[in-house]
Image (cartoon, helix red, strand yellow):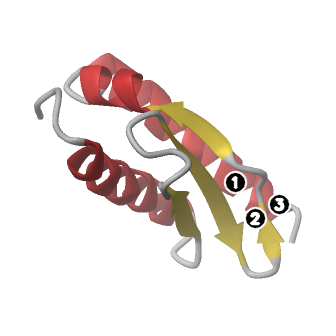
């Protein structure tokens, strides 16, 4: 993996990363990434959805994601966090 990238490149990477790890926990999990004009170049918000259940946005700082997406430790921590959220959504069913 690598660090850096434009806002849109990092958004695409984050969407794919979150979706990949959410679906490892439950194949029906979906990720909605908020990266509109108000967030452009600053942040992202990710909502995890499972059926009718949706989380509040999980906030990500663009500079942090761009810098740390090349770190295996950071990625492993984020993957564990996302999988735990999906487990909680699954248990709430």
Cα distance, mark 3 to mark 2?
4 Å
Residue bearing the label numbered 2: 90
**Apparent side of residue 66 relative to residue 27 in the rendered image (left or right):** left
Q: Position of residue 7 (x, y in %)?
A: 29, 43
Q: Position of residue 82 (x, y in %)?
A: 56, 45
Residue at 65% across / 58% down in the picture?
47
**Label 1 packing within 10 angstroms: few (<14), some (14-19), many (20+):** some
**Label 2 packing within 10 angstroms: few (<14), some (14-19), many (20+):** some
Residue at disc 2, secondary structure: helix
Residues tagged 2 and 1 counted as in contact (Cβ below 8 A)? yes
In the orientation shown, which residue stands out farthest toward the front? 37
Q: Position of residue 43 (x, y in %)?
A: 50, 37
Q: Position of residue 40 (x, y in %)?
A: 43, 45
Residue bearing the label numbered 1: 87
Residues tagged 3 and 1 counted as in contact (Cβ below 8 A)? yes
Residue bearing the label numbered 3: 91
Location of the C terminus (image quadrant): bottom right
Residue at disc 1, secondary structure: helix
Location of the N terminus (image quadrant): top left
């Amino acid at each position: 993996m690598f660090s850096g990238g434009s806002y849109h490149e990092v958004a695409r990477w984050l969407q794919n990363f979150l979706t990949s790890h959410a679906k490892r926990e439950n194949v029906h999990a979906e990720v909605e990434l908020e990266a509109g004009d108000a967030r452009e170049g600053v942040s992202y918000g990710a909502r995890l959805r499972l059926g009718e259940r949706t989380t509040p946005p999980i906030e990500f700082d663009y500079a942090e994601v761009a810098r740390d997406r090349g770190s295996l430790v950071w990625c492993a921590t984020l993957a564990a966090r996302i999988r735990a959220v999906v487990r909680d959504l699954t248990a709430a069913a």
